Image (tube, rainbow, N blue to C red):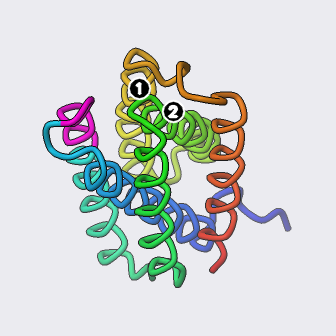
């Protein structure tokens, strides 16, 4: 017998990692704003993006509660790590804060696109709709960060590559733990 491509276990993993990612994003932006201040360079863009991430998280929280899916046990770690990453990149400078956003959103775009491929059979249209909507927001965040000078950050290729690698690791861990 062939197992269906989309299972309740896979759905739970998707919800868990997506909620963790949105939570981590809110913590990154909180760290950036703590360093840059509410009037600092890009503060308006960061607050706008943070608000969208918070709205995404709230929608995932509600869907997880309705479906009985537990959050990742790593949430306390992501709280500290996200805030630290946001603060550290902002300490380097506003362009580094934007480089952080661009790198993470590039990975999230890739991650959400893979999820949409998994959901293409129509097994969960509600989740697919959320992922598609949120992916467009994440792409807009990436584009805004690039327009705000992300690529002018010191050692941009190294910084971006390290953040993207960390993001991929966080995705894998949050799916499982």
Secondary structure type for disc 2: helix
Is 160 placed left or right of 70 in the picture? right
Question: Is the residue 30 above or below the residue 113 in the image?
Answer: below
Q: Categorize mark 2 by other alpha carbons within 10 Å: few (<14), some (14-19), many (20+).
A: many
The residues colored magenta run 40-49
Point 46% across, 77% down: residue: 75
Task: Give the residue number, with chain letter if any, for mark 1.
Answer: 145
Point 30% across, 69% down: residue: 61
Q: Are marks 2 and 1 in contact (CB under 8 Å)?
A: yes
Q: Categorize mark 1 by other alpha carbons within 10 Å: few (<14), some (14-19), many (20+).
A: many
Q: Position of residue 120 (x, y in %)?
A: 58, 39
Q: Position of residue 41 (x, y in %)?
A: 26, 30
Q: Main secondary structure of the magenta part?
A: helix
Q: Earlier in the sequence, mark 2 or mark 1?
A: 2
Task: Give the residue number, with chain letter if any, for mark 2.
Answer: 99
Point 31% across, 59% down: residue: 57
Question: Is the residue 74 above or below the residue 149 in the image?
Answer: below
Question: Is the residue 22 above or below the residue 71 in the image?
Answer: above
Secondary structure type for disc 1: helix
> For residue 3, which quarter of the picture?
bottom right
The residue positioned farthest toward the top in the image shown:
147
> For residue 142, which quarter of the picture?
top left
Question: Is the residue 160 above or below the residue 17 in the image?
Answer: above
Label tally? 2
Q: Quadrant of the N terminus?
A: bottom right
Is residue 43 covered in magenta? Answer: yes
């Amino acid at each position: 017998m062939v197992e269906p491509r989309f299972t309740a276990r896979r759905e739970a993993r998707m919800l868990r990692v997506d909620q963790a990612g949105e939570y981590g994003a809110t913590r990154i932006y909180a760290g950036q704003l703590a360093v840059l201040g509410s009037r600092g360079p890009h503060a308006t863009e960061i607050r706008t993006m943070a608000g969208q991430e918070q709205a995404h998280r709230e929608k995932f929280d509600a869907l997880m509660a309705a479906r009985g899916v537990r959050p990742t046990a790593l949430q306390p770690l992501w709280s500290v790590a996200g805030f630290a990453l946001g603060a550290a990149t902002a300490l380097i400078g506003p362009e580094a804060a934007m480089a952080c956003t661009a790198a993470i959103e590039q990975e999230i775009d890739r991650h959400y696109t893979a999820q949409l491929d998994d959901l293409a059979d129509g097994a969960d249209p509600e989740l697919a709709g959320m992922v598609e909507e949120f992916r467009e927001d994440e792409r807009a965040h990436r584009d805004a960060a690039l327009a705000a000078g992300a690529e002018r950050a010191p050692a941009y290729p190294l910084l971006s590559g390290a953040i993207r690698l960390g993001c991929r690791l966080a995705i894998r861990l949050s799916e499982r733990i």
